[in-house]
Amino acid sequence: MFTKQILFILLIINFNYVYAGVKINHWITSEGSKVYFVKTDHLPILDITVSFKAGSARDNSSNNGIASLTNHLMLMGSDGINEVDLANKFSDIGAQLDSGFDRDKSSFSLRTLKENQEKAIQLFNLVLHKPNFNKSIMDREKKKYLASIRQGETEPATIGSKAFMKTLYGNHPYGLPMSGTVDSIQKITSSQLKEFYDNFYLSNQAAIVIVGDTDVKTAKDISSKISTGLPKNLKSAFYAKVEKTEKKNINIPHPSAQAHLYFGTPIMKRGDPDFFPLYVGNYILGGGGFVSRLTTEVREKKGLVYSVYSYFMPFLENGPFQVGLQTSKDQIDQALNLVKVTVKDFIDNGPTDSELEAAKSNLIGGFPLRLESNKKIVEYISMMAFYDYPLDYLDTFSENVNAVTVNQIREAYKKRVNIDDFTTVIVGIE
Amino acid sequence: MDKELNDKIGVNYNSTTQAIYEKGLSMHLFKFLLLFIFFPISVFSQVHETKLSNGMRILVKEDNRSPVVVSQVWYRAGSIDEVNGKTGIAHALEHMMFKGTKSYKPGRFSEIIAAAGGRENAFTGADYTCYFQQLEKSQLPLSIKMEADRMQNLVITEEEFKKEIKVVMEERLWRTDDRPTSKVNELMQSLAFVSHPYGRPIVGWMDDLKNMSYKDAQEWYDDWYAPNNAILVVAGDVKHKDVFKLAKSHFGKIPAREIKGRKPQIEARQEGIRRASLKAPSKLGYIQMGYKVPALDKNLNNDSSDIYALEVLASILSNSSTSRLNRNLVNTSGVAVSASAGYAMLTRGGLSLFEFYATPSEGINDSEIEAALKEEIAKIVNDGVTKDELNRVKTGVIAGDVYQKDSVFSQGMLIGQLETMGYSHKLMDQYIKNIKKVTSKQIQNVAAKYLIDDRLTVVTLNPQTIDPNHKSQGKPHVH
């Protein structure tokens, strides 16, 4: 116990030192884009990520898949340049273009050598500002979507997570499959993609993160060019509130060897006041790798699973808390019971003092690992920017974690997490 | 080839990712690109190295950009060293390494590293087994001390083994048995390699796992877990002299042991095409084709021009969305939903496969997709590649070298992989130079020499619709 406390103090000192390394410059462009810039000059490279509130939460059941398809097509030709020529222009200067997509967010990332920065950013801006949405390319990509959706209908993990989200969210767009359905994808037109782009790839809702070997003046210039070329619509709405749905127990047969379990319910969104107690608590319950209670009970003591986990996935609106595992079909009842007992016990009694101490020590001591490279910095700051985290989040993270008490965790779980509300989806039940 | 898998735990759970199918496949390819195409060559010129008196080697890469460190212990023991009837033992022992020593009870290793703010894991490959921790830099002594402890003091009990082998069997079901493309790959390797141990799955055959005992794990540990069969790699915000001193004080006391001889197990010459098909629940088909090709010779003075030509060819075929396979088969003719190629030029086992993977579009049968892939090979043989294609590969290698330095972890990975596979540092001085020398003519020559039916193994997936009468109605039923 004594050594652990010593350790803890040492880590906090080092922790402050880290932040000297990650200094965030923040400003807002005249078009309203939020910009976060971190200067790092050890390597002659630059990373930029631009995120939009244009995830699948913008879909509805009749155009489901439109947000994903728009994101996907934006990499396939811009400003009249065809997809092959455009991609080759990036390759010719060793620049890398990438995209990301989830329920809340559509994002694009550039990585370039400093020496080719100007050329690379010009190309990146073509991608962001002037997508072709070519009809024949769209038709070709739709076929791939359909193939993927139909293939997913045979895969237990895809079947399970779709059924789980649909049950949790009912008619809310979070309940829709992110890549759409066979019917909805077929109906989407290229002019709808253009319209979707114009409505949701907005300068006043964009988050721009720049990390690398450049100065504030250049970063301001870069962000202003990115921002100016984007559509503008000050009236655009945010996502719909999540309504509570009725919990269900769903069993889906499948010839797989293992049964897959999905167990949980919507609990919290980004910026939730109970975030820290719930988050630190979940590290102890099912988030902390090999040392969580769920892993100890279900894997280490009984050998029932290769992996078992729990997590909160806060979205812009209420995101799910979820427990998951896979186990041989004949063990699924035993595994599910063990999960229920473990989760219930945690909600009722909370963690022990020593568990909380170990959790804090991991989360605080391990924080430097989250910011150890330019790539990780750009990813982490992009998350902060997109979800409007306070600018001092990095500086206050350790204090916030450190302030959490056993009692706060117990109260937060009792108040917020009700196991009787959990939906259960099992794919591959006997 | 499936050169590496099996983390102690698979931690990539992101329920919101319902990935597009071809993205899933390209992740598979990504591994090849990252490890075998874009070497961070200049990393290696700054590696500090020493050898302890017991034969253990220590390699340190200083990188002070961030106050973190990665520590990796690599053992030259992988599935390639296993014998029939005991497949999967290298990986099973890897799991047992977390189950306690004379000083620490089972699971304690993970608890201590976690409480120090660390992340840790292990993985087993065909050629090696690696244990690693990522930590804030002041915690390095903890990691070194505990790795030295489990190198010599592991306690393998029957009770713990019986539980853990169940976990390993669940892992096999999850990784392989319930994944049609993984099963195709397993069958492909076992068909392509008849006498070479690369034919056996790293995770092991299920029946071998069922019959494995704690005594087999003890035997494996006794055979291979010795300082003279291990390498310590440390990368991050450290001083190499401090690491040398630390390593000496903990690992230096462990006595060297005789490591038993390894048989060459050279693969018998293939004489004709080999084929198989595999039934599994799926909507789409899948094809994997592997041509037997050499890996880079351990003696770097020998002629390596064929190897580098194959390396560049793999990249021209499938390095990006505009590479030949994606452009021609997926985007232009549309016969495939996804198509890619890969080549592992570095292996301990001395040989490799040049592989193609494709998911045919609906309505395209196995022989049509195979013909389309072979047509791409024929185009290379007949017409070579363009100057632009060659330049793009070379530009990518040079830029990739800079980008790779952003990750301390992957710098350590590369050092450890090369060393356990038996390659010298000097390789790194040659890599970009040799890539730059590759010509279109050389690529034509290697395609004509190696990508021929007599060296080919083909496995196709025969998709089975899920029986709607399999229990209940086949539709989700709610109760």
Image (spheres, rainbow, N blue to C red):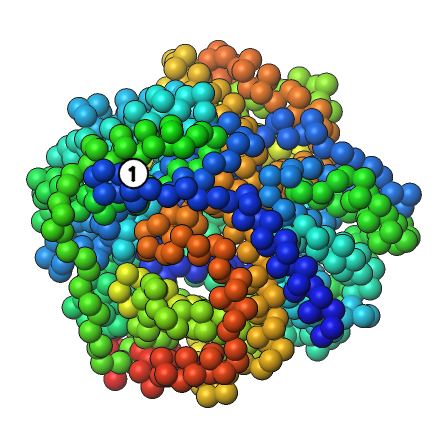
Locate residue B48: give its quadrant. top right
**Location of the N terminus of chain A (image quadrant):** bottom right
Task: Let me know if residue A85 appears in the view.
Answer: yes
When asked about the image quadrant of residue A211, the answer is: top left
Q: Residues within 10 Å of mark 1 (few under 14, many from 20)?
A: many
The image quadrant that residue A10 belongs to is: bottom right
Pinpoint the chain carrying mark 1: B
Q: Quadrant of the C terminus of chain A?
A: bottom left
Residue type at the position of mark 1: Ala
| Rendered view: B460 above or below A39 | below
Residue at point 12%, 35% (across, down) = A135
Horizontal and vertical percent position of residue A188: 11, 47
Question: In the figure, is residue A250 to the left or right of A8?
Answer: left
Q: Is residue A310 visible?
A: no
Residue at point 61%, 22% (across, down): B431
User: In the depicted view, which residue is nearer to us: A165 or A232?
Assistant: A232
Answer left or right for A188 relative to A273. left
Q: Position of residue B136 (x, y in %)?
A: 64, 53
Residue drawn at (50%, 12%) of the image: B439
Residue B297, horizontal then vertical, whole percent: 68, 27
Give the secondary structure at mark 1: strand
Q: Is residue B322 left or right of residue A343?
A: left
**Label tally:** 1
- Identify which residue, A419 or A252, lies in the foreground: A419
Up-down: is B245 above or below B153? above
Where residue B149 sits in the image (x, y, percent)?
Answer: 80, 61
Q: Which residue is mark 1?
A: B336
* Residue occupying the point 34% across, 86% down: A420
**Residue in the foreground of this view, choosing between A114 and A127:** A114
Please, is residue A172 above or below residue B312 in the view?
below
